[in-house]
Image (spheres, rainbow, N blue to C red):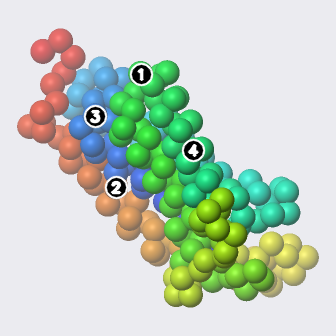
Amino acid sequence: MPSPVGHLLAGVATAWMAEALPSLRHRVDANRPLATAAAPAVTPLVLLCAALALAPDVDILFSSHRTATHSAGALGLVVAAAALAARWRGWPVLATTLACGIAFESHVFLDWLGHDGTPPLGLMALWPFSDAYYISGTDVFADVSRRYWKPEEFIFKNARSIGRELAILVPVAVLGWILRARTRRPGHGLRPPGS
């Protein structure tokens, strides 16, 4: 299963891609004095998506890892909460809800693609509809060790795992950044306030 670094990158990439959408782009641009100025890398949506991409692992605190928080049921709760929060904050509801849902689900997707050596293998992705565990078996991402008492495993193995995540997910994040930046160039329909 990927590390928090991989999950964080997926959440940030999701937010940057979402901010390329016209409705969310307008929201980010409204907070800047000139629409041609560079948008900040960290926006409220980026922080929210990063937190949501990490959120499913809160279940580690309750010794029930890869269960209900990694499921369709949890996704439903996140989407409902995101829709209510977007409406309350005056953000575009559909675009914000979609970005938040994808950021949260990116965690489940990356875990599904990861190596899992701890039974039961996989995650309860379809809970509450099914208690079955699912895993792709492709092992795109290496597992991460939590055995801090074994430095060779905890430090070196985790460093290799994180390196692999960076090699896969940094290009995705860069693509999100590029898409976001390209939609902010002059001639893409953005005007300075008051024009």
Does the image show residue 40?
A: no
Q: Extreme left residue here?
A: 187
Q: Closest to the observer: 176 or 132? A: 132
Under circle 4, the secondary element is helix
In the image, 106: left or right of 124? left
Estimate the spatial distance between the alpha carbons at disc 4 and disc 1, rounded to whole Å: 18 Å
Residue shown at 52%/87% (left/top)? 138
Q: Nearer the viewer, mark 2 or mark 4?
A: 4
In the image, 97: left or right of 121? left
User: Are the two marked residues, 3 and 2, in contact with CB atoms closer than 8 angstroms?
Assistant: no
Under circle 1, the secondary element is loop
Estimate the spatial distance between the alpha carbons at disc 2 and disc 4, rounded to whole Å: 22 Å
Q: Amino acid at mark 4?
A: Val
Quadrant housing the C terminus:
top left
Under circle 2, the secondary element is helix
Where is mark 2, residue-wise?
176
Q: Amino acid at mark 1?
A: Gly
Under circle 3, the secondary element is helix
Where is mark 4, residue-wise?
78
Where is mark 1, residue-wise?
90
The first of marks 4 and 3 along the sequence is: 3
Q: Position of residue 81 (x, y in %)?
A: 56, 36
Residue shown at 40%/27% (left/top)? 91
Q: Position of residue 32 (x, y in %)?
A: 33, 24
Q: Amino acid at mark 3?
A: Ser
Q: Position of residue 5 (x, y in %)?
A: 60, 62
Where is mark 3, residue-wise?
23
Estimate the spatial distance between the alpha carbons at disc 3 and disc 2, rounded to whole Å: 16 Å
